[in-house]
Image (cartoon, rainbow, N blue to C red):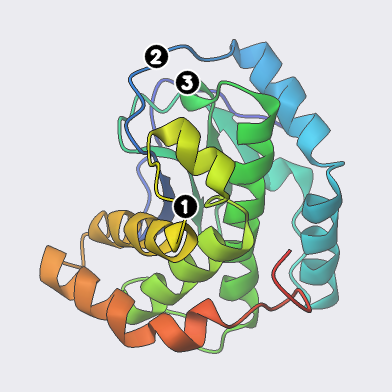
Amino acid sequence: MSWMDGSGVPEIAGVEAASSSDARGDNRHMPSEDCVAGINSALQHSTVRFLREQMEKAGCPVLPRMIRAMNCMSTNHNGSYGSGLGITVCCDHMRSQDEINQLLIHELIHAYDDCVVKNMDWKNCAHHACSEIRANHLSGDCHYKRELLRGFMKIRGHEQECVKRRALMSVKNNPYCSGTAAKDAVESVWDICYNDTRPFDRVP
């Protein structure tokens, strides 16, 4: 397995779909070697394995070397997916195995969308918003226990609010989408994308 570790996010062409990080006030993170071990462990997670299998069936296999462990030195995302580049895990933001598992699931949903959606354009705010809605909804990022740990205490309706909040944060980070454009994009595609559970039969 090939890993790349560096002092910052590499300069690349195009737009990355990044996993936004809600402020938590806790700077603890795992050592790089533990992060790499955690990624290896996450590759055996049932949902990660399922998504990789579906990607392979669709003609877009995700090889282990396409998942990079890095120190990103960024304050606004935990990792990212770049079309043609693969998945980056920001080890300096990871604190547990669960966070690594969730990140890979989230980014693999972006990778799946990039593979199967015809003419997917990450510079298009609506396209990006749709994938963010799906990734946050289907990955379990907005499970109520994770929301409680982030300091969001609302129980009723928390999941949809969380999906919208996190999708909006990510789309706002797209240099092609202003704040207003990001919000309009999330609202315009919400119904169809929130209810699109591919490649799962239902929300996991």
Q: Residue at x 60, y 34 (%)?
A: 99
Q: Quadrant of the N terminus?
A: top right
Mark 2 residue crowding within 10 angstroms, few (<14) / some (14–19) / many (20+): few
Say which quarter of the image contains residue 199: bottom right
Q: For mark 3, give the secondary structure.
A: helix
The reply to whether the C-beta atoms of the residues labelled 1 and 3 are less than 8 Å apart is no
Q: Earlier in the sequence, mark 1 or mark 2?
A: 2
Of label 1 and label 3, which has the lower sequence position? 3
Q: CA distance from mark 1 to mark 3?
A: 30 Å
Of 75 and 168, which appears nearest the observer? 168
Image vertical order of residue 3 relative to residue 87, above or below:
above
User: Disc 3 residue type?
Assistant: Asp
Element at label 2 = loop
Question: Callout 3 environment at 10 Å: few (<14), some (14 to 19), or many (20+)?
Answer: many
Residue annotated with mark 1: 155
Disc 2 marks which amino acid? Asn
Disc number lying in front (1 or 3): 1
- Circle 3 is placed at which residue position? 92
Across and down, in percent, residue 92 comes to: 47, 20
Q: Of the residues tagged 1 and 2, which is closer to the observer?
A: 1
**Residue 27, which numbered label?**
2
Is residue 44 or residue 61 the one in the foreground?
A: 44
Asked where in the image residue 5 lies, by quadrant, the reply is top right
Quarter placement of the C terminus: bottom right
Q: Residue furthest front?
A: 156
Question: Residue 115, percent across and down?
Answer: 63, 75
Relative image position of residue 180 (x, y in whole percent): 12, 71
